[in-house]
Every structure is written in C-alpha cells, then in structure tokens.
C-alpha cells in the first residue's frame, strides 16, 4: 500500500526507526562468477551528484554510489535506517538523527555528522542567503530546510522553516543523498566533482570515459551487506537495435529504455526477458508561456484539447502505460484526487479556442532529443500530426542537448514529472510551484498556484487535499504544458541476472535486489 502521510504516521515511523534492520539484511546475495555487469544505456549522466543534474540517467546510479540518511524500502514502502541509525521529531520544526558510527566513505574517511552539515551547507547546497552550486537544482526538493547542524560527532539536527509533513521522505529520496565532505573538499571544481563523487554506497567510481562508459566497482569497506557482483558498467549505446542485439549476443547483461515494438526482437530468445513497466513518473510536455504564440492561454488549452492521449498509449506503447487523471499518481493514496476532471480529447473545442484567439498560423518550435524518453521521436511526430489537424503550426526539431532544447525561441519541450515521494509535494508543486524547475527556467508561473501550494505543507490532511485539488485545476486552466501518459521503464536482461526494477528510475544493484550467476 502507498505511504499515507500524516502527523501520526510520521511520529510512529520515527519511534519505530531504531527497530528496523539495515536495508538488504533480509536477503542474501548469491555468489557469482560474473565480474562485471554491463548495462547499455541511451545516455550517460553529466553529474553523479544529484545536485549536479536532476535527470533520469543520474538517478539511475543514485544510492548505489551515494546514500541517504534514511532509506526507502521499495518492497514494503516503509522508511528504514540508512546512514542514520535512528531519528526522532523534537518538535514540528526539528528532526534529530543519530548517525551510524561504522560508516566509511570511499576515500577511507569516517562518515560523521560533520559530513551532513557540510554537504548541506553553502559549499554544495546552502540556502537562499548563501547559495551553493547545487542550490538551484535542489531547492525545489529541500527548500523547507532552514539549517543542518552537527550537534555531536554522530548526531545532527535539521530544522525547517515551516511545518513539513514530508521531511523524512525528502531525506530518503532523490536529492537527499549525502556524499563525503572530505572527498568534496579535494575536488578541483564543481564540474570535476560531478564525475568523481565520493560516497558511502556499496559501489565506488572506478573509471569514467565521457561519451563511452562509466564503470563502478564494489567498495570493500562498505558498512552494509556486500553486493553480489564486483563491478558494473554503464555503456553508452544510443541505438535501440544495437542494445537489443548486444543483449542477445551476451555483450550486455541489461539494456534500458526498451519500447514495446522492440519486445519481439527478444521474444524468441530463451536467454533474455523483458522486465519493468510504468514508474512513479508522468511523461509530459512544457509550454513556454513567454513564446510569442504560447503566451495566449487559449492556444495552450487548444494544444491540450487536440491530443488523443489514448491513441498514443495504444499505438506506441501497446497499452502498457496509462493516461493519468491530471498531473497526479494513484500512488498518492488518499491524496489522490479521483474526482478531478482531466482535459479531454476534443478537437472541435480546440478549433473554437484557436478561432477566439485569432490564431494566424504562427509557428511553434517543438525541440526534442533522440529518444532520451522511450519513443520520444515517434511521440513528437504523432503530436505534430494531431496539432496539424486542428490548424496548429508546430515545427519539429531534433537537437543534441538540453541546452539546445531550451535555447531562445523554444516553444514546446519534453519532460518527465517524477513523483520522487508519493505526494503532490513531490510532483506537481515541486516542479511548477515557486522555486520549482519550470518557474526557474522562466517558462511559466502562476501566483495563485504558488499561494495555494503552501497549504501542502500543512499538517491538516483536509487542507492539504483541497490544495492539491485546486493545483490540478489551475494546471488545466492555465496550462504550463500537459501530461501524456505514465512513463515506462522497460528493460531487457539476461535471464541469469536475477534483478528486479522498482517504480522509479533508480536501478537498485544493492545486495538483496541483485543476484547473478
């Protein structure tokens, strides 16, 4: 069952924290003769520090390299001790955590509360007054944090600016990982740190060849259960056909970003199988409201009404993903607004809005990458045709980088809206509210959206749910973009590799989730 976030659950979780065993202790990893697991990926991360790049390919490595103070167990959906052995709420604004005393960093230094304070300080993250290089990327995740202080060698206190019912989940999720302070101090600069990150995880960086591969090796000094393999390599392989062929020949052990039409290439091979499915993420579009054409809200609404999302799901994804009811996930539990009315497919209404807006055929640039997302090219082509049928002039351009996507003149772009924690604070408000990714890019903002979203920080469940419902409505009325379908993460793998994906982009290669033989 999804986590239900309320004050009672948080207090119960905090009180019980010290009773849980470390993550992975429930299962034994089998011995293996496979020394290096080779994973073919469509793109390599530009930074392995979450604060250096908020991207699916960076998240893929995540806790294999850098760990969280609190662990999120993907099986039980519960919070468990991580780098912190236990934690407790001292009051509504203060969380105290006891740091494990047996944790070594990849450079041999001992991990202490000082690492936590330093890595959340101005050298890396910082605050609105003293911004670190990671602040812009991380603030929408960690913006409620006022201070992080080491009160003893192995005890840290985190104080928030306001009540935050999700603080523990923030610390257990993407962007909450804590690297080594000593490793960070030795790095020449922020960019070089991104590909030489020193963490505490079961794997450490072994070799980086930009544009080719990144190899990670098992860390002998790891404090927890040792992984089942000696190393794994992320190998850049952009072409889908090359990935599937390499999987069949045994060159690759796992391949990422499979599309349903590629499943057939593996169907007759007894040595391979397809795993995975939709994750806690929604594939979406962003409209630049500063664009000469898109500044008219009626044009943006018309774009949304012209999209037949179910056709995309059925034809490009073989029905293996779903159309969401607004920008929300059913994983939100009782924060899911089932009564919300999502934008329908209504081309006649789209044409009417375009006429009211006096749309004269002005060109709208839609830039995208080469299948960074599954079926990204095919989806863009399908959307262009749907928009053309109602009279919209959308020009497609495939580019090579996110910088090119967002360059001057950008109108429409692709995005995925991950729910890093199962709550509206982890998805719609994190991305579109004040300080979020979209406003920070100056693509869209809405004053009422920002004001209403503050109620999500309340401990009053009814107030939080009402705020969520209103945010979903504003998203439909003044659209910063639109949702398309749940984002899939389909993998092909060799059957001998006993590994299970979870409902995020993180590929968990830790003990208990990977066996190879």
Image (cartoon, helix red, strand yellow):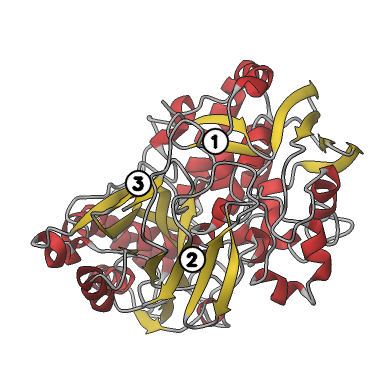
Describe the element under mark 2 as helix, strand or loop: strand
Front residue of this view, candidates 129 and 471: 129
Residue 91 visible? The answer is no
User: Counting other residues with Cα less than 10 Å from the Cα at mark 1, is it few (<14), some (14-19), or many (20 or more)?
Assistant: many
Q: Determine which residue is flagged by label 2.
A: 287
Q: Earlier in the sequence, mark 3 or mark 2?
A: 2
* Whether residue 262 is situated above or below residue 109 in the rendered picture: below
- Report x, y in % for residue 509: 46, 52
- Report x, y in % for residue 485: 33, 52
Q: Determine which residue is flagged by label 1.
A: 23
Is 140 on the left-hand or right-hand side of 59? right
Alpha carbon of mark 3 to alpha carbon of mark 2: how far? 35 Å
Is 157 on the left-hand or right-hand side of 36? right
User: Counting other residues with Cα less than 10 Å from the Cα at mark 2, is it few (<14), some (14-19), or many (20 or more)?
Assistant: many
Residue 5 visible? The answer is yes
- Report x, y in % for residue 411: 48, 74
User: What residue lies at 29% left-to-right and 61% top-to-bottom?
Assistant: 306
Front residue of this view, candidates 356 and 305: 305
User: What residue lies at 65% left-to-right and 52% top-to-bottom?
Assistant: 221
Front residue of this view, candidates 451 and 103: 103
Q: Determine which residue is flagged by label 3.
A: 500
* Whether residue 376 is situated above or below residue 395 in the rendered picture: above
Q: Which label belongs to residue 3? A: none
């Amino acid at each position: 069952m999804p986590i239900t976030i309320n004050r009672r659950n948080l207090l119960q979780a905090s009180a019980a924290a010290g009773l849980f065993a470390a993550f992975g202790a429930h299962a034994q990893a089998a011995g293996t003769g496979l020394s290096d697991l080779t994973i073919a990926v469509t793109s390599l991360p530009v930074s392995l520090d979450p604060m250096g790049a908020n991207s699916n390919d960076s998240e893929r490595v995540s806790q294999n390299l850098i760990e969280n103070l609190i662990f999120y167990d993907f099986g039980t959906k519960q919070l468990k001790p991580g780098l912190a052995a236990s934690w407790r709420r001292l009051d509504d604004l203060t969380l105290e955590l006891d740091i494990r005393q047996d944790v070594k960093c990849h450079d041999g230094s001992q991990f202490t509360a000082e690492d936590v304070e330093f890595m959340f300080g101005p050298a890396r993250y910082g605050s609105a007054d003293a911004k670190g290089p990671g602040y812009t990327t991380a603030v929408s995740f960690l913006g409620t944090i006022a201070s992080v202080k080491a009160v003893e060698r192995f005890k840290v206190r985190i104080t928030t600016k306001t009540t935050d019912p999700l603080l523990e989940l923030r610390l257990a999720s993407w962007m909450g990982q804590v690297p080594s302070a000593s490793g960070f101090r030795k790095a020449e600069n922020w960019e070089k740190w991104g590909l030489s990150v020193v963490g505490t995880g079961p794997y450490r960086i072994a070799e980086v060849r930009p544009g080719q591969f990144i190899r990670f090796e098992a860390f002998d000094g790891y404090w927890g259960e040792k992984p089942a393999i000696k190393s794994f390599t992320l190998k850049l392989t952009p072409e889908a056909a090359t990935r599937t062929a390499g999987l069949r020949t045994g060159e690759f052990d796992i391949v990422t970003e499979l599309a349903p039409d590629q499943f057939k290439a593996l169907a007759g091979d007894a040595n391979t199988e397809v795993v995975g499915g939709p994750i806690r993420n929604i594939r979406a579009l962003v409209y630049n409201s500063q664009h000469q054409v898109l500044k008219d809200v009626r044009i943006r609404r018309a774009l949304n009404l012209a999209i037949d999302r179910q056709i995309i799901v059925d034809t490009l994804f073989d029905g293996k993903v779903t159309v969401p009811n607004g920008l929300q996930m059913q994983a939100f539990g009782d924060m899911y607004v089932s009564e919300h009315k999502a934008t329908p497919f209504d081309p006649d209404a789209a044409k009417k809005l375009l006429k009211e807006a006096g749309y004269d055929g002005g060109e709208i640039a839609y830039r995208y990458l080469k299948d960074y997302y599954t079926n990204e090219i095919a989806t863009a082509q399908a959307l262009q045709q749907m928009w053309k049928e109602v009279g919209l002039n959308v020009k497609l351009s495939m580019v090579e980088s996110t910088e090119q996507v967002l360059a001057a003149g950008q109108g429409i772009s692709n995005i995925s809206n991950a729910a890093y924690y199962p709550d509206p604070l982890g998805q719609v408000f994190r991305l579109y509210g004040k300080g979020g990714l979209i406003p920070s890019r100056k693509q869209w903002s809405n004053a009422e959206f920002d004001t209403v979203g503050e109620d999500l920080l309340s401990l009053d469940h009814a107030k939080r749910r009402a705020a969520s419902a209103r945010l979903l409505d504003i998203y439909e009325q003044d659209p910063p973009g639109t949702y398309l379908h749940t984002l899939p993460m389909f993998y092909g793998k060799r059957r001998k590799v006993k590994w299970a994906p979870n409902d995020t982009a993180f590929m968990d290669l830790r003990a208990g989730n990977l066996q190879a033989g």
